[in-house]
Amino acid sequence: MEPDPHLRIAIQKSGRLSDVCQHLLWKAGINLLFSERTLVVTSSNHPIDVVRVRNSDIPSLVMEGNVDIGVTGENMLCEKRLQRLERNQKAGYTTLGYLGFGQCRLSIAVPTNFAFTDLSCLQGCRIATSYPMLLKQYLHLHDVHADIVPLTGSVEVAPSIGMADAICDLVSTGATLTSNHLVEVAQVMRSQVLMIKHLGKLSDRNAHTLSAILKRLNGISGQAVTSPDHAHHLPGSA
Ligand code: PRT
């Protein structure tokens, strides 16, 4: 008989969410020995494999069922979901809950000398972003016709080099916008980190392991691992 595969959990390998995700797993009682080069880390006390990947790949890995569970920001989740729907790819998942960190907002910002009064000021503008699908949906909703300029990073630089008239990027403290002479004018979505699950059924053993982890996380203040109803109203959600 085939051995029962371990419960697979995808987290960001390196970046803003990686340390906090590793800490979270440790707080959930999962013993893991991380090393820089090891991409699949097997727990020494639970039948769990932690898969370390790019944050941007986590939604697709969960939707395809390559991993059972993923920890990612809802900004990334919603963007990838819209992208996959457009390509007729699987885009389903279950939200297990919000984890109480990684709070930010996806916002439109303009140069401080831009005479902005309302969204109609963005008609015909070029807007640089790493979130083209979410921006497209937002602009469509508000009847704004603008050119979306895709950029994978350092989006805040776009207006100063003449590449765009405005930007749409993640903001947490607002310090990066200020340093680049930009001002936030509209909020596309709010985001925080959440835990998602593939739609497929888990083996009894893995379902039991997941339920034990969720119970432990629920016992940790700040982590509310439940299925919030408003998950269904996220941009790009079912
Ligand atoms: O490369 P990979 O695919 O692994 O990851 P990524 O490009 O998504 O990585 P990373 O590590 O930059 O961000 C991971 C996730 O952290 C994001 O998808 C969000 O869910 C969350 N998060 C929370 C943020 C921020 N806050 C944030 N402030 N991600 C990025 N920023 C950046 C923002 O893009 C801007 O450049 O920080 C700058 C603004 O910060 P403030 O504090 O100056 O406003």
Image (tube, rainbow, N blue to C red):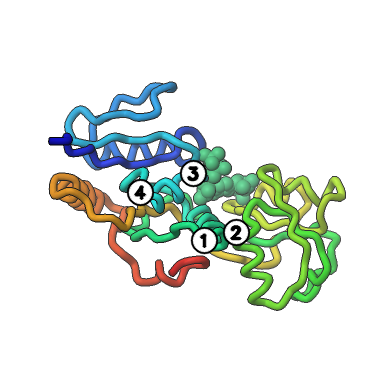
Of labels 2 and 3, the one closer to you: 3
26 with respect to 135 (left or right)? left
Residue 32 x %, y %: 28, 29
Q: CA distance from mark 2 to mark 3?
A: 19 Å
- Label 3 C-beta lies within 8 Å of the nearest ligand 1 atom: yes
The amino acid type, in three-letter code, at marker 4 is: Gly
Q: CA distance from mark 4 to mark 1?
A: 16 Å
* Label 4–label 1 contact, CB within 8 A: no
* Label 3–label 1 contact, CB within 8 A: no
> Considering only order in the chain, which callout, 1 or 3, is on the residue closer to the N terminus?
3
- Nearest the eye: 133 or 180: 133
Q: CA distance from mark 4 to mark 2?
A: 27 Å
> Considering only order in the chain, which callout, 4 or 3, is on the residue closer to the N terminus?
3
* Label 3–label 4 contact, CB within 8 A: no
**Label for residue 57?**
3
- Nearest the eye: 167 or 39: 39
The amino acid type, in three-letter code, at marker 2 is: Leu
37 with respect to 84 (left or right)? left
Q: CA distance from mark 3 to mark 4?
A: 12 Å
- Name the residue that disc number 1 marks: 88
- Label 4 C-beta lies within 8 Å of the nearest ligand 1 atom: no
Residue 14 x %, y %: 49, 33
**Label for residue 106?**
2
Residue 209 x %, y %: 18, 45
Q: Residues within 10 Å of mark 2 (few under 14, many from 20)?
A: many
> In percent of the image, x 78 and y 62: which residue is there?
147
Image vertical order of residue 57 relative to residue 91, above or below = above
- Name the residue that disc number 4 marks: 65
Instruction: Residue at the far front: name it.
Output: 1
